[in-house]
Image: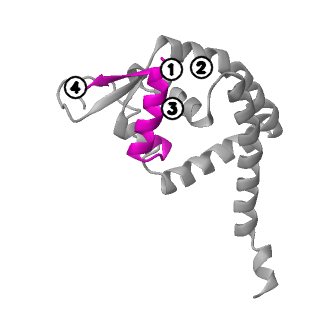
Amino acid sequence: MDQNVFEDPRITAVGLLVEAHAGLSARFAAQFEEHGLSPVEFEVLTRLARSPGNQLRMTDLAAQTSLSTSGVTRVVDRMERDGLIRRRACPSDRRSSYAVVTTAGLERLDETLPGHLRIIEEWFVGQLEPDTLTVLLEGLRQVRDAVHPGATAGSTGAAVEEDC
């Protein structure tokens, strides 16, 4: 094997991304745990809270989180038992349902977000100059859209009731 392959900037780019993600994820997980949330539960609450009507179709939630539909069902079941979200049937399609963040879920997010934002500021965006951050965000969106085209499924549009 050619040793120069390990100096390839593509390997370096992916390695740095993975290392940065791992370091941030560890800090986030510890902070979420302080508020009784797992990383995936925080992601679900955040995605729902950022969506029209604080809700997403279960299939869109699965697409946005890269969980399987059964994985989303298990997480939603657990979070529903904890009172953080509820299910709502789609009035026009009985096969479809929504996950809706509850008042308790929004309150948990309100408690969690200040610490989360401090970590983001200290360990991520605060490490970068504003112009560097802008370029990074543009690049990350391009890569995200290529590798995860469903990442924004169901998060646009106001006709939540009619569009099941």
| Cβ atoms under marks 2 and 1 closer than 8 Å | no
| Cβ atoms under marks 3 and 4 closer than 8 Å | no
Seen at 57% across and 36% down, the residue is 40
The residue where tag 4 is placed is 162
Q: Is residue 73 magenta?
A: yes
Label 1 or label 4, whichever lies nearer to me, is 1
Label 3 or label 4, whichever lies nearer to me, is 3
The residue where tag 3 is placed is 44
**Mark 2 closeness class: few <14, some 14–19, many ≥20 residues within 10 Å:** many
Seen from the viewer's position, the closer of residues 28 and 155 is 28
Residue 145: horizontal and vertical position, in percent?
A: 49, 51
Seen at 22% across and 26% down, the residue is 162
Whichever of labels 1 and 4 marks the residue nearer the N terminus, that label is 1
Label 1 or label 3, whichever lies nearer to me, is 1
Amino acid, disc 1:
Asp
Inter-mark Cα distance, 2 to 1: 14 Å
**Mark 3 closeness class: few <14, some 14–19, many ≥20 residues within 10 Å:** many
Position above or below: 86 against 69: above
